[in-house]
Amino acid sequence: MINTIPVAIKPKPIGVVRSPISNRDIMPPSGEMAKILVFPEYARALKRIEEYSHLWVLAWLHQAEREVLTAVPSKVNPTVPSFGVFALRSPSRPNPIALSLVPLIKREGDCLEVKGLDVIDGTPVLDIKPYFEHDTVFSPCSPYIPARKKETMTQALWGQALNHHGEECTDLKLAVRMGLFIEERLGYLKNPELKLKVIGSPCLADCLQGLTRARLANPPRFAYQEDPEVKKVIWTKGQEIIFMTVVPKLHSKEIMTLADEELFTVQKRISIVR
Ligand SMILES: [Zn+2]
């Protein structure tokens, strides 16, 4: 068995990140607008990159600890048991390579403007690759790490709904609020035992599908009935059933701030299996 590496690995940065955030402690969980300045000698490697909407950015986290092999995802929830760093996206790892998937907003010469990049100003960039449609895994399995703060959970759900739906519409906000409500009561939204039936607009159905990753079949967790008059979702997990109906005539601007009872009427039932 060969246990030595035949070639010395010396990655050479191809560019650098310019971000308004220069301290990792204040980096928002969803990252920040940033620019990637590609060095002139690599400019030709950007040819036709603007034909892609999303990019994978590999960066070198020059400030990260490299001796750590287990860690707690403390930004999400410091109370959960630790994971090995290869089972986390922690910056601490033997080779502190960051892997970020970001939308490409625009290219200006050797400069790529991207959204939601979660590395700080001055981070060296090692590589850029395009994101392909077939990179998508619709219902992956991953351990459930519930966010401790509601704000972190809201941001996470918002990002998931937006990735799936592609626009920040009124129904995306309603879906996020429903997701927060249900996660608190029925647990993990992607639990294979959680089923939902959406009666209402295609936007609401789409956003909730993005949040729950529920498919129509294999296994059947999701059902949809288009109805322009109501917005109603029936959630089922085991014997528990929650009916949520959106209060009519809400203003889009107030959805994220209203109390649950001002947004939804909720009925709960326990189904009796004979
Ligand atoms: Zn929409």
Image (cartoon, rainbow, N blue to C red):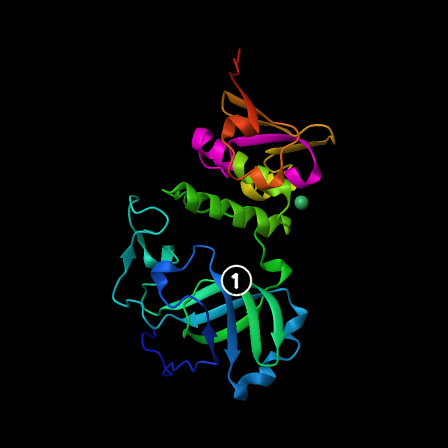
Taking the magenta stretch, the answer to whether it contains residue 197 is: yes
Q: Is residue 214 visible?
A: no
SS at mark 1? strand
Residue 144 position (above or below residue 112): above
For image coordinates 32% across by 77% down, the residue present is 4
Residue 242 position (above or below residue 140): above
| Range of magenta residues | 179-205
For image coordinates 35% across by 65% down, the residue present is 23
As drawn, the residue found furthest toward the top would be: 274
Name the kind of residue labelled 1 in the image: Leu
Residue nearer the viewer, 64 or 137: 64
Question: Where residue 232 appears, x then y in whole percent?
Answer: 63, 28
Could you say which quadrant of the image residue 134 lies in? bottom right
Question: Where residue 3 appears, x then y in whole percent?
Answer: 32, 74
Residue 96 position (above or below residue 274): below
In the picture of the structure, the residue carrying the numbered disc 1 is 101
